[in-house]
Each structure stands twice: as structure tokens, then as C-alpha cells.
Amino acid sequence: MSLLVLAVLAGLAAGLIHARSTHSTYDIKDLNYAWLVPIAYLPQLVAFQLPATRSKLAAEHAAAALVISQLILLGFAWSNRKQPGFGLLGLGLVLNLAVILLNGGLMPISPETAARLIPEVSPETWKSGNRLGTGKDILMATKDTRLWWLADRFLLPVWIPYRAAYSIGDILIAAGVFWLLWSSGRQKNRAGLIRREI
Amino acid sequence: MKAIQTLTLIDPRYVRLALVALTMILFVISAAAPGSPGDVGIR
């Protein structure tokens, strides 16, 4: 399971525990235009998830799918900007989109980072300009990467049984989602609440 | 019939909680772009 999904579940658990421990209520508000999220996911499903389509799609089409999807998500984030955490995750989204757009439509990762991430594969395999398999990343030398500091360049500690290369934007997105779900446990009694019994 | 009865017993607030959680899971999967060994078929 992705650590980003874990951030959602951890935020939810932290919010519920906080609500219970403070005899407060868990107040989760409806999200505006939530239907935009599954719509934004569809191009990525075709470009990066479904085995039948992802390997057949040209890099430029995969890039277009990613950019279109992220623009839709940006609209969703903007329409919910008054909700807690959305400022942070919106900023993460903008940073990811900036580095993606300035580098041809996919998230750059350096061959050195790819070699550290996947040591099973010979380092010579990682050639600039190639995609990292069928994912959202493209191999690009750091010196050729615009806004290289926003690219996928952080690796998780080795003791975590999951390997991934993250960007600053990814970290902000995870933090924003955690904040949104955790802060819902800090609300006091209001209409339409989930009571602390849960 | 039993399934329908169970569904109608679910508090709408729980449904809302589940929907928001699912929406945000889909959001992070789509919004973030981490590279992983799974991209090249290594688990």
C-alpha cells in the first residue's frame, strides 16, 4: 500500500482518536465538486494503471493524460481551498505540476536516484529521456532538469518496507490530506456531526 | 432484503465519512507522482 494512502488512513485515525480523547465530535464536511476526483483519475487509470493500455501509450500521450488529470485536481483543490489542509495540498499539487510542465509533462527523476531506488536493475539501464517503466516518471539528468529540487529525489528510509522516490510536492500533498482528516477531529458540536462514539 | 435493511440502518454521517476518505485516497493516488519499483514491474 502506498504511503500516501497510509497518510489518508493515519489522518482519519488521528482525527477520530483526537475527537474521542477530547470528548469532541468528528466533523467531516462535504467536499465541493468531489466528482472531479474520479474524473481526474480516469486518464491516469488508462495511462499508468491498466496493463492493457499503459504499455501501448506513447510517452507524449501519457504526459498529456497526467497534465490534464492534474489540472482537474487543481480545480478540485481550488474549489475546496477554505477547508483545512487544502492550502498545503494545493501547494504540493502546484509544485508537482510546475516541475512536470517544465520538463515535458512527466515527473523527472535522475538516473542516480533511479539506481538507488531500484538497485536490482543495472545502473546502465537508466538513460536520460526514457520513462521509468510505465509510471509517471521520466529519467532526466539533474543538470538538465528545470526546478530539479521539485523532482522525485527523496527516498524513504531503508527500514520502511516500501520503496518510492518522492518529491517535495508529494510530501506536501500527504501532509495536507493528513491535516484535513486530523483537523476534523478538533471540531466542537455543530450540526451534521459524526459523534465521538465512532 | 436483509442487505437493504442493513443499508438503511447506516448513519448518513458514516457514509459521508467513507466517501470523503475514498475521495481523498483517489486524490492522493492521482495528485502525487512518486516513482517506485512497481513502475518497472518489480515488486
Image (cartoon, rainbow, N blue to C red):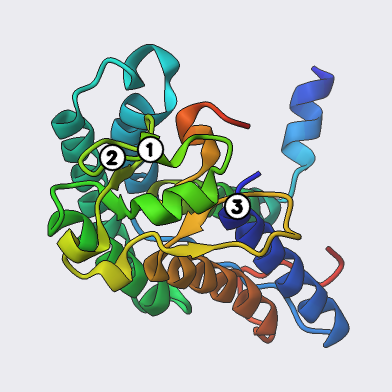
**Horizontal side of residue A88 vs B2, given as left or right:** left
Give the residue at mark 2: A127
Give the residue at mark 1: A124
Relative to the observer, which residue lies in front, A84 or A68?
A68
Q: Chain of mark 2?
A: A
The answer to whether residue B32 is seen in the rendering is no
Question: What amino acid does circle 3 point to?
Answer: Val
Residue displayed at 39% across by 11% down: A52
* Mark 1 element type: helix
Assess disc 2: are there few (<14), some (14-19) or many (≥20) residues with their C-alpha within 10 Å of its C-alpha: some
Give the residue at mark 3: A5
Q: Tell me how far mark 1 sits from mark 2, CA to CA.
A: 7 Å
Question: What amino acid does circle 2 point to?
Answer: Lys
The answer to whether residue A73 is seen in the rendering is yes
Q: Position of residue A70 (x, y in %)?
A: 26, 51
Q: Position of residue A174 (x, y in %)?
A: 52, 66
Q: Are marks 1 and 2 in contact (CB under 8 Å)?
A: yes
